[in-house]
Amino acid sequence: MDYCEILKVLPQQELEPRQFLRICFGIANLSPELLLEEETKFQYSSACIKLLSGLLGISKQAVRKWGNNPNFDKMPQHTRLTLAYINKCNLNKAIINAIVKGEQYTPPSATAEIFLKKVFFEGMTPSQRLATVTHINFRPQCIKTLSQVLKIAASTVQEWGQDISFKKMPKYHQYTLGYALVILQQHQQHQEEQVLKLPVPV
């Protein structure tokens, strides 16, 4: 899958935390009056912090530093992108409820190397992988892919390292890549299911 195909599958816009939380808790379509009623409940504020903390793999204290709940105006742009990816994953309602109840949840995570190998090498033979890695455009493709998926400058990606591991990539991006992989895998599974539904030639 090349980066052009990836971009067709992944969300292109960040998602505001307040809207994300409304979607997660199933209140996005309520009237303004009912929305206000739900969002001003004491347990809603606590649930928002628990959910963001669990889904993003960060402490509740870090979430509180993002500003007033549920707007979280100080949330970084890269985290808002992660929210868009999480939303695209169509999380099971049971998972959301479990996180809010305090149950342990491990968010999907992927290093740059794992992500790129999944994208470029999945389904390839060893000889095809070797040909891909040794191609002169491979590193530029890796940089462009990470740049597009994480919505950051290619020059920033270049600073993370000279090989496919990009070891200097900040850890918080691993969660973004992890959720991106979930989306791509779901897309691939859907395509395979559609193929299976095609009539068999006689």
Image (spheres, rainbow, N blue to C red):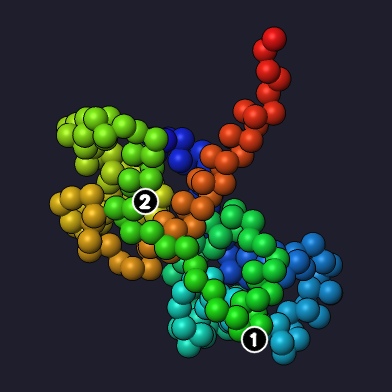
Identity of the amino acid at label 1? Ser
SS for callout 1: helix
Look at the image and tell me whether residue 48 can be seen.
no
Rendered image quadrant of residue 112: bottom left
- Tag 2: residue type? Phe
In this rendering, the answer to whether 35 lies above or below 132 is below
The percent position of residue 144, horizontal first and vertical second, equals 31, 43
Q: Nearer the viewer, residue 146 or 94?
A: 94
Q: CA distance from mark 2 to mark 1?
A: 33 Å
Q: Which residue is farthest top? A: 202
- According to the image, label 1 marks what residue? 46
Residue 171 appears left or right of 8: left
Badge 2 or badge 1: first in the primary sequence: 1
Callout 1 crowding tier (Cα within 10 Å): few <14, some 14–19, many ≥20: some
Instruction: Give the quadrant of residue 138.
Output: top left
The residue lying toward the viewer, choosing from 70 and 3, is: 3
Identified at 49% across, 57% down, the residue is 179
Q: Position of residue 91 (x, y in %)?
A: 63, 61
Quarter of the picture holding the C terminus: top right
Which residue corresponds to the image point at 84% horizontal and 67% vertical from the top-left? 31
Q: Is residue 141 left or right of residue 57?
A: left
- Residue for badge 2: 115
Pick the quarter of the image with the N terminus.
Answer: top left
Along the viewing direction, whichever of 123 and 107 lies nearer the viewer: 123
Percent x, y for residue 186? 57, 46
